[in-house]
Amino acid sequence: MRLLLSALLALSSATAFAQESPPSCPVADGTTKTEDLQALPTPVAHSLQRHVPNLSPPGSLFNGGDVLLPGQSMPGRRLIAAFHRDNRWVIAYEAAGVGFHDVVVAYDLSPDGKTSTIAFKSQTLPASLCSTVERALTANGPIDRFW
């Protein structure tokens, strides 16, 4: 019983932490921002869906911890925003796990708009999210392996 109560407390605190609003990054000149996954170009949306299935929309509930109870199906990832400058699309999302963090991934869209390539990917903490997004809008690499 004590173990179950501990698990419930851990889950509720992690979910509560994850429900806090992520930082709202300013949008630089020449950059657009959206919180709508439907606004992403098809190749970017397909790659994101393949790597991050069940990405929940901004503001929705999601499991920000590393504990899932039987029957629980709350997504473990939540979109913060997508940024677009020239052919670069930068997606920022919250990720659950042992250490709650944000992930920033940049895609370069081909000139014909039919393919995309991952150009940058990094994990970050909420305090450095906006600087990581700004770096992702221009940098190539690094690309870490964790989604």
Image (cartoon, rainbow, N blue to C red):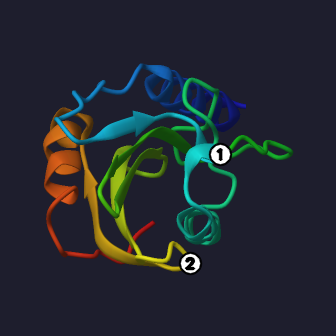
Q: Position of residue 5 (x, y in %)?
A: 65, 27
Locate the C terminus and report the quarter of the image it occupies.
bottom left
Residue 67 in view: no
Judge by depth and name the residue closer to the eye, 91 or 34: 34
Q: Residue at x 49, y 31 (%)?
A: 14
**Disc 1 on helix, strand or loop?**
helix
Q: Residue at x 23, y 40 (%)?
A: 129
Against 50, residue 67 (above or below) is: above
Percent x, y of residue 44: 53, 65
Which amino acid type is shown beneath numbered disc 2?
Lys
Q: In the picture shown, does residue 133 fall above or below 22?
A: below
Relative placement, left or right, of 69 versus 128 is right
Query: Can you tell which mark lies on residue 78?
Result: none
Where is residue 79? Give x, y as percent.
Answer: 51, 41
* Closer-to-camera residue (136/7): 136
Q: Nearer the viewer, residue 10 or 41?
A: 41
Mark seen at residue 38 = 1
